[in-house]
Amino acid sequence: QFLLLVIVTVVSWYSLKVFFPDAPRQRVMGLFGCTHKTVSVGVPLINAMYDGNSNVGLYTLPLLVWHPLQLVFGSLLVPHLYDFVQRENKRLGRVDEKQLDDDDAASQYSWFY
């Protein structure tokens, strides 16, 4: 399953490069959106498909292994993806987007302070 996750991640990453060549944050978001599927979606789907089947527990087992594997693999990728976004923003001549987001959020809620 780990090899399958790596293959899906690599294919997603290069596919997203085609769709978002100048949007590094969208590529990172898309990477996690393409490869991470949750137990909350999978278990009800499996239960609906195999309603009344006595082996439904066995059918959910791969999903219960897959989800933690996604979390661990994604956690290992986060520092590298953060560096990628910073490098791409610098290459594209953009200012730090996090600072812009913080400034926008602060001005948006300035009436609250």
Image (spheres, rainbow, N blue to C red):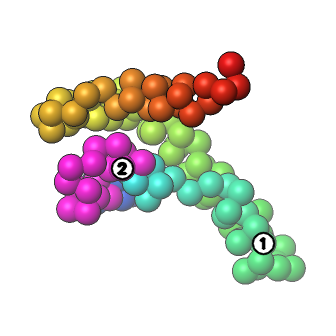
Question: In the figure, residue 98 lies in which quadrant?
Answer: top left
Residue linked to disc 1: 47
Residue 90 at x, y percent in the picture: 17, 29
Residue linked to disc 2: 26
Q: Which residues are magenta?
A: 12-29
In this image, 48 relative to 4: left or right?
right
Q: Which mark is residue 36?
A: none
The answer to whether 22 is drawn above or below residue 91 in the figure is: below
The answer to whether 35 is drawn above or below residue 44 in the figure is: above
Which residue is rendered at x = 54% and y = 25% of the image?
Answer: 106
Which residue is rendered at x = 76% and y = 67% of the image?
Answer: 44
**Mark 2 falls on what kind of element?**
helix
Question: In the figure, residue 15 lies in which quadrant?
Answer: bottom left
Which residue is rendered at x = 20% and y = 54% of the image?
Answer: 21
Q: Nearer the viewer, mark 2 or mark 1?
A: 2
User: Which badge, 2 or 1, comes first in the chain's sequence?
Assistant: 2
Residue 20 at x, y percent in the picture: 26, 56
Q: Is 95 one of the magenta-colored residues?
A: no
Q: Can residue 6 be seen?
A: no
Name the image quarter holding the C terminus: top right
Residue 72 at x, y percent in the picture: 50, 35
The answer to whether 43 is drawn above or below residue 98 in the figure is: below
